[in-house]
Image (spheres, coloured by chain):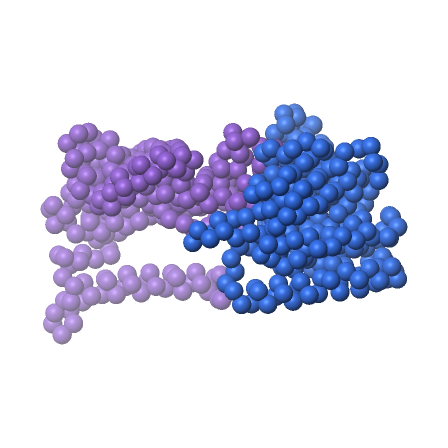
Chain colours: A blue, B purple
Amino acid sequence: MDTTKPTAVALDDATVAFRLADNRVYTAVEQASLSVEHGEFVAIVGPTGCGKSTLLNVAAGLLKPASGAVRIFDQPLTGLNKDAGYLFQADALFPWKTAIDNVAIGLEIKGAPRAQALERAQGWLTSVGLGAFAGRYPHMLSGGQRKRVGLAQVLIRDPKILLMDEPFGPLDAQTRQIMGNLLLDLWNADRKAVLFVTHDLEEAIALADRVVIMSAGPGARIIGDWKVPLARPRDISEVRMEREFHALHREIWSVLKDEVMKGYAQSSQAPAEVA
Amino acid sequence: MMSRPVLLFCQLMVAVVGLALWQFLTSVPIFGRILLPPFFFSNPVDVASQIVDWFVRGTIWKHLLITLWESVLAFTIGSVAGVLVGFWFARQPRVAAIFDPYVKMANALPRVVLAPIFTLWLGLGIWSKVALGVTLVFFIVFFNVYQGVKEVSPTVLANGRMLGMSERQLTRHVYWPSALSWMFSSLHTAVGFAVVGAVVGEYLGSAAGLGYLIQQAEGIFDVAAVFAGMFVLSAFVILIDLLVTFVERRLLVWRPDGAGGHG
């Protein structure tokens, strides 16, 4: 890593709490410290409902931590994180805009002329493999195609940081692999800082430079941080065959397994409190 | 399901059987008694000849045009007001909270009782009917738009924010399209109510329109003309509804099912 460049995202002892309907306070994430260096791809893995997305929303500026600091390129974060592009887990495309308009909007709101925005948007649609689908509305596209449009929508603004919240979660296994490779190809071109949340450990190892493990909530903490020793560029489906992959997977899973069981026990006992 | 020609044939048969039964019961005595006295029930032949007569002599056009014009005005004014107020309330929760009891009160009132007041204020011309239609259309559109703006997907909204939209841009690219889509989904109901407002207004006091025509016929016990008026009115509403469906298809192409239905 280039150490002269400032750290892209730095969470320092960030604690996030919500007030529930009955006025109790629910602590989602407790004293999480995490940094993503310039050009680094970091994956956060944890059991369902542990507050991974919460952490991402803090980095995006959509949520304010109750205590602790958030710094983006060494500047304290106030308001929304303008350097970040955010790929949501749920469908976030504008359903009333066609694919190309969905992609072009990021430039248009910055004041780019429409013709130019459309031209660049067409280019991005082509690079995510949807050049021929520009005129389709989101409901006419498959789940995987919608994710591609979402990716183009985020990347056309050329954000310095990419925040991704289980972006491929709802897709089937084959499509996930294809999307993973597409993401790595695009990322390879300019190596943005990426914070990628997933519940899938294999996906995390295959994609990331570093894998961060969170404990089961409430009061989830960061309980582990592993470097991934796999060479780049990678192919998602091939990298899974390598010995280092399996060794690392076994090592991380031994820690993660207990948390997953804890998380499962909690979610099957108590009524769901905060998603 | 059955094939389209079969379906059409069956639908046609319902009309034929219905009309035949009507004609039969009003003209042929059963056990020495006519079950449906023509004075109260008329008969299909008389009703049809009345309709033909209206169109041949051209007297119906004036009434149709008046009713159409009243409906269009009521729909337009009511919709525009409903969209604007609904949008304003949804974006300004304080304003909405203050006016909430009054909105509920106004909507709870059966609008027909307003008709005499509108006649008093606006006279016997078209505007008292337009006003009645507006009070009906406004609330449907208002509630739909209000709901539409309130229920914008939080993810889509957060996405807009993360893409760098200002509040004004969010209004234009997120809230506004969402509000309009809900408005269009209430279009059928709104158009229907615009016609109801016009016809009821005419019925209660006017000098022209389909409601007036029916009311006049009732006044002189011309049952054939009453039925004829009802048939023309139904056809009129169906035609308008077809037009609405066409407009809706064009404007809501982005909708998964082409058109939803709230209302």
Residue A28 coordinates in the image, percent (x, y): 58, 52
Quadrant assignment, res A22: bottom left
The residue shown at (36%, 64%) is B13
Q: Is residue B196 above or below residue B124?
A: below
Q: Nearer the viewer, residue A223 or B33?
A: A223
Residue extending farthest to the bottom is B31
Q: Nearer the viewer, residue A59 or B112?
A: A59
Left or right: residue A5 versus residue B29 is right
Left or right: residue A36 versus residue B212 is right
Residue B159 coordinates in the image, percent (x, y): 59, 41
Q: Nearer the viewer, residue A159 or A219?
A: A219
Q: How many marks?
A: 0
- Residue B180 in view: yes
Q: Is residue B14 above or below residue B195?
A: below
Quadrant assignment, res A218: bottom right
- Residue B200 in view: no
The residue shown at (73%, 43%) is A35
The residue shown at (84%, 40%) is A1
Q: Nearer the viewer, residue B106 or A122?
A: B106
Residue B101 coordinates in the image, percent (x, y): 27, 41
Residue A190 coordinates in the image, percent (x, y): 80, 37
